[in-house]
Amino acid sequence: MTATQSSTMPTTGRQAATALLDPNMLSKISRLDMVARQVMDGYVQGMHKSKHIDFAIDFAQHRQYVPGDDVKRIDWRLLAKSDRYYIKQYEVTTNLRAFIILDCSGSMAYKGKAALSKYRYGQFMAASLAYLTLHQQDSVGLITADNTIRDFIPSRSTPSHLINIINTLEARQPGGESSLAELLHQIAQQITHRGLVIIISDFFENPAALVSALHHFRHRRHEVLMLHVMDDDELNFPFRKWTLFQNMESPQQRIRLDPAMMRRQYLDNLRSHLTTLRGTAADLNISYSLFNTSSPFDDALSEYLANRMKGHRA
C-alpha cells in the first residue's frame, strides 16, 4: 500500500542515454570494477583473469617442475641457464556474464519526497551497471518483469548494446501486479550459463516464495546481488495525519487510515521482512544491500561498488 504515485515521461535514443548516463555520475563509477566472488564458467573467484594452464594466452609466471607435470611445458631455455626444471604458467582472460533484472511492478512507481521514484532510481542503477559491465569489456543482459517477463535482452559485450539496453529501460514503465518470485524461477531456467545475476527490486514479495527463487539461482551456481530499493516513506512511515493509502498494483484498492494506529505494526512487519531478506542472503552467500531513494543513487551505488571491491580484496 502506498500514499502517492509518481509518473515519468519516456525518452528515446540519444536523449535517453543522456538522461540515464549522467557524465558526472559515470566519472564516479568508471574506475570501479564489478567483481564476482565465486567460481563461474571459465573464470575464477572474483576475477576476470584466471590461471588455466590449458588455455595459454599470456605468460604469467614460472613454477618449479614436479613429477606429473606435462614435460611439454618445461622451459628448456631456463633449464640451460639454471640447471633446474621449471614449467611455464599462463593467464587466460575470460568474460563475466551479467544479467540485470529490474522489477517494473506497480509498487516500484512509488515516489514520496525523494527526487526519484523507486523505479526511476532502479533505471539509473541498471543503466549505470550495464555501462560499467560493458566498459570493462564484459557482457550484460537486461530483464524487466512485473507479473510476466516484459523484456529479455540476451547478454552481449558490444558497445552498441548499451543503447539497446537504455532504450528498453526508458520504454518500460512500472505497472501491474508483482509475481517476482515466480518469475525469478523462470528466469533461472532461461539463463543457461552461470554468471552474475543482479536483481533490482523493492522485494515486496512473500518471503518464503522469494527464498525458494533465490535458492534456485544459487542451485544453478549463479552469483546473485540483491539491490533492495525502498522509499524513505516505506522505511520510516512518517505519516501522522489521516491518510488515503492506495494499492499501486491494484489501484482500485484504497483505504483511509489513521497512521498512528498502524505505525508500530507496520514497522515491526517491515523489520521482520528485512531480517528475513538479510538472513536469506547471508545463508546463500548472496550480496544484499538496501538503498534509500532519499540518498543520491550515484553516491549510493559508488559506495556499494567500492565496498564490494574492498570485500573482494580482503
Image (tube, rainbow, N blue to C red):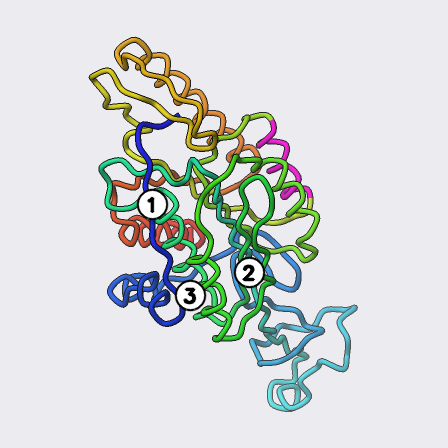
Q: Which residue is mark 2?
A: 141
Horizontal and vertical percent position of residue 228: 42, 39
Residue at image coords 35%, 49%: 120
Amino acid tagged 3: Tyr
| CB under 8 Å between discs 2 and 1 | no
* Residue at numbered disc 3: 131
Q: Position of residue 48 (x, y in %)?
A: 54, 66
Please name the residue that numbered disc 1 is placed on.
Answer: 7
- Going from the N terminus, do you reach mark 2 or mark 1 first? 1
* Near-viewer residue (63 or 31): 31
Numbered tag placed on residue 26 in the rendering: none
The residue drawn where x is 54% and y is 71% is 157
Q: Amino acid at mark 1?
A: Ser
Residue type at mark 2? Gly
Task: Please tell me whether mark 3 or mark 1 is closer to you in this view.
Answer: 1
Q: Secondary structure at mark 3?
A: helix
- The residue positioned 53% from the left and 52% from the top of the image is 37
Q: Main secondary structure of the magenta part?
A: helix
275 lies left or right of 256: right
The residue range painted magenta reads 209-219
Lower sequence index among marks 3 and 1:
1
